[in-house]
Image (cartoon, rainbow, N blue to C red):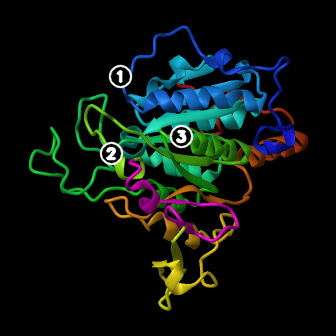
Amino acid sequence: MSESDFPSLRLVPKAREPQKAKDFKTDQEVRWCPGCGDYAILAAVQSFMPELGIARENTVFVSGIGCSSRFPYYMNTYGMHSIHGRAPAIATGLASSRQDLSVWVVTGDGDGLSIGGNHLIHALRRNVNLKILLFNNRIYGLTKGQYSPTSELGKITKSTPFGSLDAPFNPLSLALGADATFVARSIDSDRKHLTSVLRAAAAHRGSAFVEIYQNCNIFNDEAFEPLKDPATRDDFTIRLEDGAPIRWGANAEHGLYRSPGNGLVAGEVAEQGEAGLLVHDPHNDDPSHAFELSRLADISLARTPIGVFRAVDRPVYDDMMSDQLDKARATQGEGDLATLLAGSDTWTID
């Protein structure tokens, strides 16, 4: 990989020496429940980071609260285990003021979509140059099994003994509604696919939002099993590829078409032919195509797309802020913070 492959990191100094996965591992004991999907995600990220060629001291992982938010302890980089739901806000300040850093946010469906939902959508709409990894296990794991913002309707948990009455969030639809410029989904157990999505997110300049289906084997085991079980995964999982017709199945026998009513429908390629197959275009400025794909799967996970849904260019908050400050300095000189805080409407009382 070359520097040109990662335009989002153009201002970040390169590492002096080649790095390996072991260089990103700390001496801390990894403390998740045995079998937790977080282990697989951690291993994938640690193995991927050397590709970026970024020195560890120029890499930062910021997390909120939850099982996923222990991530910074296990990454041998700078990091911050911050406040519940506030990781995107803290990371925004860091990324916009220090463009010499590669900033990553690690959050979960509870941390990122409940108390942190407001911070998440504003980071995405601003298009701050940071990468947000949201681990979605459809449950609160750290606090021992309450329903989360992505739990299905009717979910019986410790906090909903008669079943949840809340309609679940669709994280990708939420991100697209906030006009996120990069939106993707992957699965904890598919390391090759997860790495390819991480690579695409790292290359994107602006906010990159990646939902990762992550298994909590203690409080919500096998939540995504239809996408992993060899007996069902080919018929349930749609692998999106840029510029390719959207097909899936063991023999690519299923296809996605647009109906006369302008909606998306699944059909058998042998019956409907290849000419009408919908071609995936994540670079379309209009987010409608990506949004329709994000709504394709229901709670059963039938017809679940994974991959990059949207990847478009838009002015980056960090760049615009830097330009604005440069212009202010050129016309007004260096500012005086004390004068700014005091303003013209203060007075002294003897």
The magenta stretch is 229-251
Residue in view at x 16 percent, y 47 percent: 156
Chain-order first, disc 1 or disc 2: 1
Q: Quadrant of residue 240?
A: bottom right
Indicate the secondary structure of the residue bearing disc 3. Answer: strand
- For marks 3 and 2, give the CA distance: 15 Å
Residue drawn 75% across and 20% down? 19
Where does the image place residue 134, in percent across and percent down from the top left?
A: 48, 42
Q: Is residue 8 visible?
A: yes
Residue under label 3: 133
Q: Is residue 96 left or right of residue 276?
A: right
Tags 3 and 2 touching, CB below 8 Å: no
Residue 319 included in the magenta stretch of the image: no
**Position in image of residue 324 (x %, y %):** 79, 47
**Foreground residue, 244 or 140?**
244
Sooner in the amino-acid sequence: mark 3 or mark 1 = 1
- Is 82 drawn above or below residue 284 in the view shown? above
Q: Give the CA separation, mark 3 to mark 1.
A: 21 Å
Distance from the alpha carbon under mark 1 to that under mark 2:
18 Å
**Residue wearing tag 2:** 138
Magenta highlight on residue 237 = yes
Left or right: 156 as drawn, with respect to 72:
left
